[in-house]
Amino acid sequence: MRSYSLFTIFLLCVAILIIDILTFYWLQSITRLLEPSLKTIIHALFWIFTIGLVSAILILKIKLDDIDPRRKQLLISSMYGLTVSSFIPKIIFIIVISLLFYMNVIFSEKESLVVIPLVGLFSGFLPFFVIVYAIFKAIYRFKIYRHTLEFEQLPSSFNGLKIVHISDLHLGSFNYRFKIMNRAIKLINDIEPDLIFFTGDLVNNYAWELRGWQRVFIKLKANMGKYAVLGNHDYGDYSKWKTESDKKENHDAIKQFYKDIDFKLLLNESDIIKKDHGDIAIVGVENWGHPPFKQYGDLTKALEKTTEVSFKILLSHDPTLWNEAVINKTDIPLTLSGHTHGMQAAIKIKGLQWSPIKYKYRHWAGMYRINDQYLNVNRGLGWLGFPGRLGMRPEITFLKLISHNKNH
């Protein structure tokens, strides 16, 4: 909530109140069938929750700077969860029951007394329970997404290369629940990967979020190496710092964490891996995205030492770089990104996936191909903001690369 002005938060509270007034208007048409005492209790509880939520949001915003940073993240996430689980079901309830009343000509008077209340309640409670499931269950239902890709540029000595790609851990959101992440670590190690790639957003903002996590991530095993790049949240740009020195100290501590867990952090640079008579380049750029995201990345610099290497894997936190600077402008066959989280919400119908995030990012979840260049946008292993996932499970990507190289 720090990134939003007090005026924006005030408008949010006004919107909540308007929706709740409309909801209450239609709710009365349902509760009129109940006993007066029960009806009074339901009405009272409705407004107690509304006033409590709005008050909590305003107080949290006003007192945000005085709250301990650790408690602050937990409180903000809780407010997100409460707001979404209240706001969305009520909007659906208003739309459905309004349509039913305006279509009342379809039902007889007796039918309308039963059908409209039942359908109205169902339309409100169903999305509420779906959101509750997203918050308490789906958020940590890690899923392995598997892809087999074939490349002519890949040296035959790397045929069958096994890669695990993870992204967007946002460890501050886990609130030190190490056991949950250990499940993901086990899934990764069971694949027995040759390479593990992490494409940024290790934290939400602060290096202190990393306390205790070293003993978890040091368990990750890869035969050829572990590599990472920074995400937009890893620079400390979303926090207020007393001095630039404090910000730099925070940033340096985040970079040190990668050394502590045996990951090579690529800062606009590349690393060459040799095997038998072949070699591949792992290229890592710092975060690069359209404003308001800053452009720390320098792809030209990162590629400097790779001119003689035919197969390159690019790690770029923001998938925007692929469309802007990679496709048809470089010979990079495989790019790995994250950043979008797939908005942590999507609708799936017969293999098709839709999310509002598609209107902001052209490439937002899964595998994309243009000509012979591929991009994988990881849906993220952690979460930020809304403490749940709906139709967008946390992702571990497993890539198996097949060589069609005839020169080796």
Image: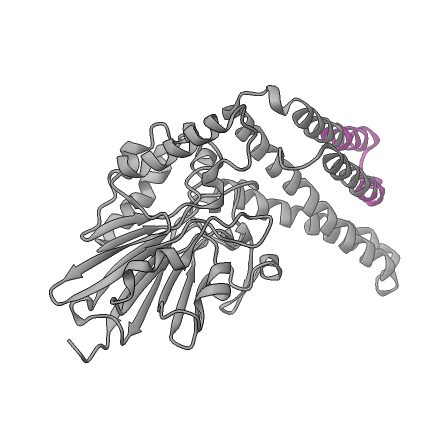
Residue 403 at x, y percent in the picture: 23, 73
Q: Which of 250/89 is in front?
A: 250
Dividing the picture into quadrants, the one containing residue 194 is bottom left
Q: Which of 76/46 is in front?
A: 76
* Horizontal side, residue 125 vs residue 158: left or right: right
**Vertical position of residue 264 compared to residue 146: above or below:** above
Name the residue located 36 percent from the left edge and 67 percent from the top edge.
Answer: 332
* Horizontal side, residue 266 vs residue 133: left or right: left
Residue 302 at x, y percent in the picture: 36, 56
Name the residue located 35 percent from the left edge and 69 percent from the top edge.
Answer: 333
Residue 155 at x, y percent in the picture: 20, 70
Is 47 covered by the magenta stretch?
yes
Q: Quadrant of the N terminus?
A: top right
Residue range of the region highlighted in magenta in the rendering: 22-49
Q: Which of 50/379 is in front?
A: 379
Name the residue located 73 percent from the left edge and 26 percent from the top edge.
Answer: 55
Name the residue located 87 percent from the left edge and 59 percent from the top edge.
Answer: 102
* Horizontal side, residue 22 vs residue 90: left or right: right
**Vertical position of residue 179 compared to residue 60: above or below:** below
Q: How is the image coloured?
A: one colour
* Horizontal side, residue 179 vs residue 205: left or right: left
Q: Which of 126/230 is in front?
A: 230
Per the picture, the main secondary structure of the magenta-coloured stretch is helix
Q: Quadrant of the C terminus?
A: bottom left
Dividing the picture into quadrants, the one containing residue 61 is top right
Is 59 covered by the magenta stretch?
no
Q: Residue furthest left?
A: 276
Count numbered badges in the picture. Answer: 0
